[in-house]
Every structure is written in C-alpha cells, then in structure tokens.
Image (cartoon, helix red, strand yellow):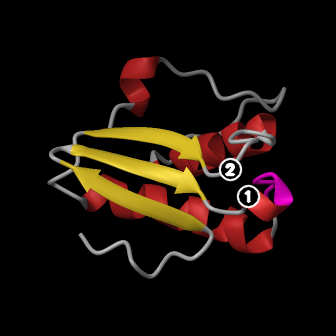
Amino acid sequence: MDYSRYQALSCEQQDKVLIVSLNRPEALNAINADLHTELSHIFADIALDQETHAVVLTGRGRASFQARLAFTMAAFNVLVQWHGLQPNMYGFVPLSIAELSL
C-alpha cells in the first residue's frame, strides 16, 4: 500500500512490519488536527493492507511520544468505530484484545 500521502506521519515498510512515525518533531509530536485526521485514516489503511502484519508506532525527534494519551485515545476510537462497537451506559466499551485483532 502507498502511504506517501501522509504528511504528519511517516511510514516505512520493513518486510511485513510497517513503522509509523509521528512526524511533528518541532512540536514534540503533539497531536493537532492534521495528525489526528491522519491517525484515524492510517489505521483504516493498515487494516486493508495485506502486506502489513505488524505495526511499530514511534515518533521523530527527541520527544517521540510527548502526547501518548491523546494518541492512545485516537487509535482506540478508530478501532472501536472500525469494529462497530458501542459504549455502554457508562461510556466504556467492553471488549477483549481478541475483538480488536486486525
């Protein structure tokens, strides 16, 4: 799959592993609107990519994961939407790791 359209993310394929890097080192990889949008799109692309069996997430620059919580929530939301899961009355999505396997 061609990942060259992404600007806020950089992607490098190594065999069956896709290395996805947050590419905003000047902002300590803080998530802005562009990065948020690209994160939601890249996981949809990865789900369709039959050449990728594993993903390594990292970041460029000295603070590779300055915004871990925001990234984790963005990725989690994409997975929840992709699997069509609905939060319960408390706002939680009961699931197991097996349910999120791509």
Task: Determine the residue positioned at 81% across, 32% down.
Answer: 91
Front one among 15 and 48: 15
Expressed as whole percent of the image width and height from the top left, the position of residue 80 reads 56, 43
> Residue at coordinates 46% horizontally, 55% vertically from top-left?
43
Which amino acid lies under the numbered mark 1 shown in the image of this protein? Pro
Left or right of 53 on screen, residue 99: right
* Quarter of the image where the N terminus is located: bottom left
Q: Which amino acid type corresponds to the residue marked 2 in the rendered image? A: Gly
Quadrant hosting residue 33: bottom right
Residue 44 x/y as whole percent: 42, 60
Mark 1 is surrounded, within 10 Å at the Cα level, by few (under 14), some (14 to 19) or many (20 or more) other residues, namely some
Q: Which residue is at 15% across, 53% downward?
A: 51
Q: Do the residues under discs 1 and 2 have CB atoms within 8 angstroms? A: yes
Rendered-image quadrant of the C terminus:
top left
Percent position of residue 45, x then y: 37, 64
Which residue carries the number 1 mark?
25
Looking at this view, name the residue that lies furthest to the front.
62
Q: Depth check: 45 or 62 in front?
A: 62
Find disc 2 in the rendering and name its residue: 61
Read off the magenta span. 27-31
Q: Please state the horizontal and vertical placement of residue 57, each as a whole percent of the image.
A: 51, 41
